Image (cartoon, rainbow, N blue to C red):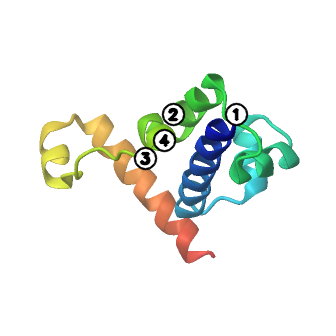
Amino acid sequence: MKEKKNCNVEIGKRLKRIRENMNYSQAEFAEILDVSDDHYRRLESGASGLTVEKLQLLFEKLHVDSNYLVNGQKKDDFDLDAYLASCDREKRDELLTRCLEYIGKLVTR
């Protein structure tokens, strides 16, 4: 049981880092995951574990890498030039829109 708790604590730390990097409040992340604010705080602290359904929601809504969230392994470095050169216009525009939204959130902090 203690191992599961340690695993949940590490996942909670990564979840918090992701949330802060995306400039969301705990309440906003709780809403995205469709859980109470209190339950979300327990997820970040490691007192509760994420379900597969919640991992899927994070991926679908925010493109959070489940592999990183669960085991801390990051994908290889992202090459923006290669991505933009090889994607279609719709994907490029989607990426740029997301980047602008992210920058906008940082500016309004």
Closer mark to the observer between disc 4 and disc 3: 3
Residue flagged by tag 2: what amino acid is it?
Phe
Q: Which residue is mark 3?
A: 72
Separation of marks 4 and 1 at Cα, in angstroms:
27 Å
Q: Mark 4 Cα within 10 Å, few/some/many (few <14, many 20+)?
A: some
Residue flagged by tag 1: what amino acid is it?
Met
x%, y% of residue 87?
20, 36
Residue flagged by tag 4: what amino acid is it?
Val
Q: Which residue is mark 4?
A: 64
Separation of marks 2 and 4 at Cα, in angstroms:
5 Å
SS class, disc 2: helix
Is 88 on the left-hand or right-hand side of 67?
left
Q: Earlier in the sequence, mark 4 or mark 3?
A: 4
Nearer to the camera, 28 or 68: 68
Q: Any mark on residue 1, and which?
A: 1
Residue occupying the point 54% across, 53% down: 14
Separation of marks 3 and 1 at Cα, in angstroms:
20 Å
Closer mark to the observer between disc 4 and disc 1: 1
Separation of marks 3 and 2 at Cα, in angstroms:
15 Å
